[in-house]
Image (cartoon, helix red, strand yellow):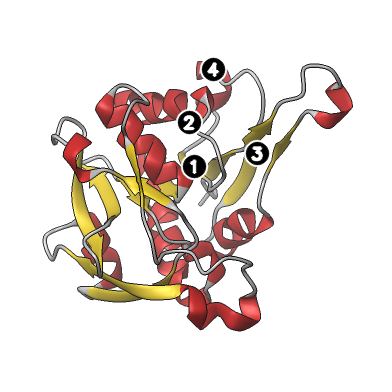
Amino acid sequence: MNKPIIGIIGVKLINEENPFLAYTKFVSNYGKRVREAGGIPIGLFEDINDDNLSLCDGFILQGGLDINDDYLKVLDYAFKNNKPLLGICLGVQAMGEYENETSNETLIKVDGHNAQNFELSKLDLFKHKIYLDKYSKIYDVYKEDVLYVPSVHDFAVDERVIKNKYFKITGRAFDGTTEVLESINDNWIVGVQFHPEIEDKNLVLFEELVKEAILNKH
């Protein structure tokens, strides 16, 4: 069986004056988890279009600081072409923006979700509980309704912008913060505010993405 190709959308760093300081950044753990899950990761750089997106069987919207247009292009492509997608941190925030159809007032500031100065040796300082809807795609992955997950973010999707046009909320943090969005249709598009790429036990989420990508190939 051919391994599915998972396209990872990079975070753009723009410098109009110095092209040597303008580049696209990829966090290596995303590709590592895709490989461990049985897929082939590829990085998607400039000029995101149907030609290069059609090479992929599934997608990851990785974490970062600013939502760029590529995130929204890939979301639109995944919806229209029934391809699975996993959004992580900034990725789920892009899903909120796609739902809201504007960047205005999509996100809210949250407290207690980022202990600052992340270090893997102090991971427990960056973890909290989230609660999952038992009738959801994310619950089908974990088979648990409470998860203890790494969290490193200062903003989250404002629940008031989620009108179930494309997405619904299926996971919340201990304080009610939106933690999981997923597509309202059968297409496997799931976004999580936490960082599953950090811990081995969350490999199941990447395995589900790869499994859905394999189904998409047929």
Three-letter amino acid code of the residue under disc 3: Gly
Q: Residue at x 53, y 48 (%)?
A: 63
Residue 49, labelled with which disc? 4
Three-letter amino acid code of the residue under disc 2: Tyr
Residue denoted by label 2:
71
Three-letter amino acid code of the residue under disc 1: Leu
Q: Are marks 1 and 2 in contact (CB under 8 Å)?
A: yes
Q: Are marks 3 and 2 in contact (CB under 8 Å)?
A: no
Up-down relation of residue 50 to residue 53 (above or below): above
Q: CA distance from mark 4 to mark 1?
A: 15 Å
SS category of the residue bearing label 1: strand
Tell me which label, 1 or 3, sits earlier in the chain.
Answer: 3
Tell me which label, 1 or 2, sits earlier in the chain.
Answer: 1
Quarter of the view holding residue 43: top right
Q: Are marks 3 and 4 in contact (CB under 8 Å)?
A: no
Three-letter amino acid code of the residue under disc 4: Asn
Up-down relation of residue 75 to residue 92 (above or below): above
Q: CA distance from mark 1 to mark 3?
A: 11 Å
Q: Which marked residue is nearer to the observer: mark 4 or mark 1?
A: 1
Residue denoted by label 1:
61
Q: Where does residue 103 sit, x and y in percent of width and height?
A: 37, 26
Q: Residues within 10 Å of mark 1 (few under 14, many from 20)?
A: many
SS category of the residue bearing label 3: strand
Q: Is residue 75 visible?
A: yes
Q: Residues within 10 Å of mark 3 (few under 14, many from 20)?
A: some
Tell me which label, 3 or 2, sits earlier in the chain.
Answer: 3
Tell me which label, 4 or 1, sits earlier in the chain.
Answer: 4
Up-down relation of residue 207 to residue 11 (above or below): below
Q: CA distance from mark 3 to mark 2?
A: 13 Å
